[in-house]
Image (spheres, rainbow, N blue to C red):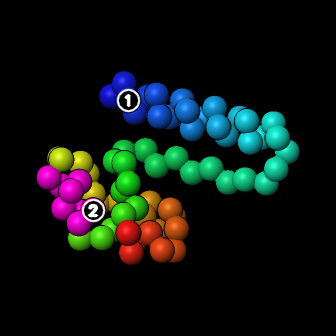
Amino acid sequence: MLLLILIFKAAKTMEEKLKASGISYEVHIYPGNAHAFMNRSPEGVKRRKDMGMPDEDEASSELAGPDSKHG
């Protein structure tokens, strides 16, 4: 849980720096998703399941990018 909190804080810090820079950006945070959840390859799915990570959030995978289903 501590790792997730640290990752979330790092993402928010990056978002603040991007905002301050004045450049165009888009940040998405995917609560409840494991690392590399957008890797939809059979190997990626198996690896997460073997590690007990959730892997059923298709909507987040789609939002992560058009090629995310292909690993």
In the image, which disc is placed on residue 36?
none
Residue position marked by numbered label 1 in the rendering: 3
Depicted 2 relative to depicted 28: above or below? above
The answer to which of marks 1 and 2 sits earlier in the sequence is 1
Give percent across and percent down for residue 17: 73, 36
What element does badge 1 sit on? Answer: helix
Q: Is residue 58 visible?
A: no
Quadrant of residue 12 within the rendered picture: top right
Give percent across and percent down for residue 48: 23, 54
Depicted 57 relative to depicted 11: above or below? below
The quadrant of the rendering that contains the C terminus is bottom left
Q: Nearer the viewer, residue 34 or 43?
A: 43
Magenta segment: 43-50
Residue 49 in magenta stretch: yes
Q: Is residue 65 visible?
A: yes
Q: Nearer the viewer, residue 8 or 59?
A: 8
Furthest-left residue in this view: 50
Q: Main secondary structure of the magenta part?
A: helix
In the image, which disc is placed on residue 44?
2
Residue 45 in magenta stretch: yes
